[in-house]
Image (tube, rainbow, N blue to C red):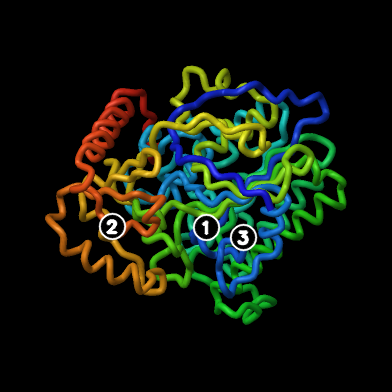
Amino acid sequence: MKIYRFAFAIFISSGLGPMVRAAPGDKPNVILIMADDLGYRDLSSYGHPEIKTPILDGVGRDGIRLTNFHSGATVCTPSRMALLTGSYPVRLGWTQGVAGYLMGERDGMSPQALTIAEIFKSEGYKTGMSGKWHLGDLPATRPGNQGFEDTYYIPLSNNQTTKIYRGDELVEDPFTNRMLTEQFTSEAIRFIEKNKDQPFFLYLPYSAPHFPVEPHPEWKGKSSFGDYGDVVEEMDSRIGEILATLDELKIADNTIVVFTSDNGPNPQEKAGTLPYRGEKWSALEGGTRVPCVIRWTAKMPGGRESNMPVNAMDLLPTLCRAAGIDWKTKSKSKLPIDGRDVLDLLLADGSDAPQEALLYWMGRSPVPRAIRVGEWKLFFKRSDALEGPGTSRRSPEQAEALKVLMKSTDGDSPILFNLSEDPGEIIDLSTKFPEKVKELQLKADTMSAEIDSSVKLEIAKPQ
């Protein structure tokens, strides 16, 4: 297997390379699949010793496996905002938490936001969504008013609601949590079969393996990793049903399939992030670094792996360019797009230009908590880097080093890590490289000032 290694780069520029023009009738279909709270290590191809995910492992072998992919935020609602708009969630009015927790149950993404579904729909694509929405339950914030024509969804997380909607119609209440992965998959297949003769964009945000983790009756006890492993392995198998449908319809080659997760794992679950530290809600690497595999067999060479940093915000410009869509024109006069086009990386057509920097937020605050530039990552307050994972997500070596880290200086001082040498974020280099601390802090201040001065959309709230 050929390994592609790239220098660390990060995520703010929006360079647009030469357009990939799709001939009429030759536009690629797109299926964007997202798990909920799946940890970096929770696929077998990412190193899990017990969970078996042959389907998703195969997607990576047929295309590319990204080992430095980051979700758009550390918790569900802002992560989905970033994914669907290509912008930092604070530009859309997000301040803390998720819909139904620290936000109101019906609070959601502004109807003025330009989503990837709206862009694809404007180019003649049929757009569908099946899964967990979590971006608002007001009429104007529901998926049908954010660019998705065909929708089947739960409005909140599976621990917050009992309702399933098709469009604006309530079709099931209460739902059976253990059956959701099967139902979302069936609806996805229905959408694909219905639209097999025209280009389509399908968004499939599974609720699995978000708590409560309850295996499907036919999958209970199938894995060797308890209920959590059962749920992940079922999801992998259901994705296999979708890929088999594409094969049967003879549209697999020209369908782009993307799989990732919305953020790191929930602290109470048996998920894995090693060698990274941290989890959902945290700005540590384990909070945003997640698995991502992509295939497009008509265009992408397979058998590749890349450690080039890619962010969920990058998917909007990248998928648009793959479909021959000028996303810059579409987004003109709208919010700034913080993601960048990385199609050249996917096509193995040269290295993409490095991005300047990535800001990190934690799940409970609209203030940036860290910045990464190249291999360097700076936490502005040491206390934010001391959040640790449960013992199941910490190696013995990390545990010992963390004891030393927690004893050093005060909680308000900065802390600096070199991710290429210290992926677990346990060796503080701030006193050794004070100029690097100043450099990164200045960059963060400049980026924050730009965001603060730019136009922001307000979160949609019930009147």
Q: In this view, does 200 lie above or below 424?
A: above
Circle 3 packing at 10 Å, graded few (<14), some (14-19), many (20+), is few
Rendered location of residue 442, percent (x, y): 24, 31
Q: How crowded is the residue under tag 1: few (<14 C-alpha within 10 Å), some, or many (20+)?
A: many
Residue with the most extreme left position: 410
- Mark toward the viewer: 3 or 2: 2
The answer for how far apart the CA atoms under marks 3 and 2 are is 51 Å
Closer to us: 460 or 305:
305
> Could you classify mark 2 by the number of other residues whose Cα lies within 10 Å: few (under 14), some (14-19), or many (20 or more)?
some
Among the two numbered marks 3 and 2 on one chain, the one whose residue lies closer to the N terminus: 3
Helix or strand or loop: what does disc 1 sit on? loop
Q: In which quarter of the image is the C terminus?
A: top left
Q: Residue at x 37, y 56 (%)?
A: 422
Where is residue 426? Give x, y as percent.
30, 59
The kind of residue on which mark 3 rests is Glu
- Mark closer to the chain start, 1 or 3: 1
Say above or below: 176 vs 354.
Answer: below
* Nearer the camera: disc 2 or disc 1: 2
Image coordinates of residue 94 in percent, x first then y, are 36, 40
Three-letter code for the amino acid on which mark 2 is drawn: Ile
Circle 2: element type = loop
Q: Name the residue under label 3.
A: 172
The disc label shown at residue 427, or none: 2
The residue where tag 1 is placed is: 36
Query: Spatial distance from mark 2 to mark 1, Cα to Cα?
Result: 30 Å
Q: What residue is drawn where x is 23% and y is 40%? A: 437
Q: Distance between the residues labelled 1 and 3?
A: 21 Å
Where is residue 181 drawn, in percent x and y?
64, 62
In front of the other: label 1 or label 3? 1
For marks 2 and 1 on the same chain, the one whose residue lies earlier in the sequence = 1
Which residue is located at x 57 percent, y 18 percent?
Answer: 329
Q: What residue type is labelled 1?
A: Asp
